[in-house]
Image (cartoon, rainbow, N blue to C red):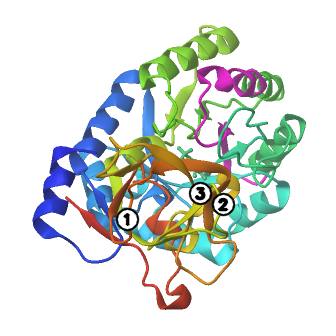
């Protein structure tokens, strides 16, 4: 929560659930990343929060952008980014979208298999490609599974194939899992990356870039290490595995760039019990999984929730959204302590919601409008 957000909510009193994003926090976060990893270029992961004001600010600060679709590429271009500052980082692309990106001047593409390399070679001849390797994501609160990346042994063949087809096989990427609380998580992936660099060097292909991905956390309820600590751990791992031949690096923060810049204002619609002797109250908010809080899936992300009665005694609550879908329950397995005095109609503030909220909200499930956002 920032003073600017508090004042905005007090003065404007917006109706309905909404996200308010403070650009000052985004600016501070950008500068913090730039200072903590001075030798890395920052490619902001647009999907975390694609609000035009956020993209414009980051473009003005000198950020580059990691985009997953032609629509995101167009948003980054509209914000003022030049094509050389945009990466098409999705490993799953239609060939015609690769061509559309190439036509817009984009020359940097992610791949994780030979089939995708062939598409890029046809639709974006001569472009730079980096191969994403699998990462076990241990410890991440929002792990990224096996959907993206290949095993390091396969990456060698993928990049050789790219080279053979006239592409510029430039490097390796990985993602250690989103909301990664362990700064050492980059070490194993960097060991694999260095191994791939050596193998390909022996075969006459000189890689020169490592894309370190995202994973930098936002503070929710638990304490997290400073970005500086991540920077130090990553530089140490780079020195350990690459010696004095440290490659060019890029980072793709999404959550860490915007998560703590946003607060969702919501309202208590109903408080009830399922039985008279039930110790747990059900608290229904006017925002739920389909209104932008999808990362509460499996109760993975636990947001700080503030009320105006936080000084009062608390008791456990199940927190649920307003839609007629039984999946629309935010916290039940681990109930959430809220003030006993909390009442229907009270406003609640859900902190750390600047990332992955507006982009996850449904268009009109049950007629609830998508999460409105104000960028100040
Ligand atoms: C989503 C995504 C990111 C951002 O991850 P965070 O954990 O939010 O920082 C970075 N890179 C790629 C390729 C992504 O898909």
Confirm whether the magenta stretch covers residue 186: yes
- On whether residue 322 falls in the magenta region, the answer is no
Proximity of marks 1 and 2: CB atoms separated by less than 8 Å: no
- Closer to the chain start, of discs 3 and 2, is 2
Looking at this view, name the residue that lies furthest to the front: 277
Foreground of the two, 113 or 353: 353
Q: Residues within 10 Å of mark 1 (few under 14, many from 20)?
A: some
213 versus 270 height, above or below = above
Q: Residues within 10 Å of mark 3 (few under 14, many from 20)?
A: many
Q: Is residue 104 visible?
A: no
Stretch of the chain drawn in magenta? 165-192
Q: Position of residue 26 (x, y in %)?
A: 30, 45
Question: Whole-Å distance between the Cαs marked 3 and 2?
Answer: 27 Å
Quadrant housing residue 201: top right
Residue 329's mark? none
Q: Earlier in the sequence, mark 1 or mark 3?
A: 3
Indicate left or right for 2 with 288 as reference.
left
Q: Quadrant of the C terminus?
A: bottom left
Residue at 69% over, 76% down: 326
Which residue shows up at 60% across the image and 74% down it?
A: 97
Tag 3's secondary structure?
Answer: helix
Residue 186: image quadrant is: top right
- Residue 316, placed above or below residue 184: below
Instruction: Give the residue pinned by disc 2.
Output: 278
Q: Which numbered tag is attached to residue 295? A: 3
Circle 1 is placed at which residue position? Answer: 343
In which quarter of the view is residue 138 placed?
top right
> Where in the figure is residue 132, as x and y percent of width and height?
72, 44
Gap in angstroms between the C-alphas marked 1 and 2: 18 Å
């Amino acid at each position: 929560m920032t003073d600017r957000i508090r004042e905005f909510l007090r003065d404007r009193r917006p109706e309905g659930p909404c996200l308010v994003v403070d650009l000052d926090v985004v600016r501070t976060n950008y500068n913090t990343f730039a200072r903590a990893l001075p030798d890395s270029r920052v490619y902001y992961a647009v999907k975390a929060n694609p609000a035009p004001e956020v993209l414009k600010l980051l473009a003005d600060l000198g950020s580059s952008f990691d985009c997953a679709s032609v629509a995101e590429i167009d948003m980054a271009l509209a914000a003022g980014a030049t094509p050389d500052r945009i990466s098409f980082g999705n490993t799953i692309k239609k060939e015609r979208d690769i061509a559309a990106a190439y036509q817009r001047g984009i020359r940097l593409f992610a791949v994780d298999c030979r089939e995708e390399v062939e598409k890029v070679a046809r639709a974006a001849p001569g472009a730079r490609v980096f191969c994403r390797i699998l990462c076990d994501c241990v410890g991440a609160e929002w792990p990224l599974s096996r959907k993206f990346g290949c095993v390091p042994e396969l990456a060698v063949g993928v990049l050789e194939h790219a080279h053979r087809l006239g592409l510029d096989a430039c490097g390796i990427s990985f993602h250690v899992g989103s909301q990664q609380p362990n700064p050492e998580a980059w070490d194993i992936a960097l060991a694999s990356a260095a191994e791939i660099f050596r193998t390909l060097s022996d075969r006459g292909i000189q890689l020169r870039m490592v894309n370190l991905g995202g994973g930098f956390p936002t503070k929710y309820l638990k304490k997290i290490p400073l970005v500086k600590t991540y920077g130090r751990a990553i530089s140490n791992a780079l020195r350990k595995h690459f010696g004095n031949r440290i490659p060019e690096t890029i980072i793709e923060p999404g959550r860490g760039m915007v998560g703590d810049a946003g607060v969702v204002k919501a309202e208590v619609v109903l408080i009830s019990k399922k039985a008279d002797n039930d110790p747990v109250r059900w608290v229904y908010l006017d925002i739920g999984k389909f209104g932008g809080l999808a990362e509460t899936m499996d109760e993975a992300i636990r947001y700080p929730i503030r009320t105006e009665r936080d000084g009062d005694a608390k008791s456990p609550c199940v927190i649920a959204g307003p839609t007629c879908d039984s999946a629309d329950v935010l916290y039940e397995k681990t109930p959430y302590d809220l003030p006993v005095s909390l009442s229907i109609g009270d406003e609640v503030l859900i902190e750390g919601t600047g990332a992955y909220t507006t982009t996850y909200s449904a268009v009109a499930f049950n007629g609830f409008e998508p999460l409105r956002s104000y960028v100040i």
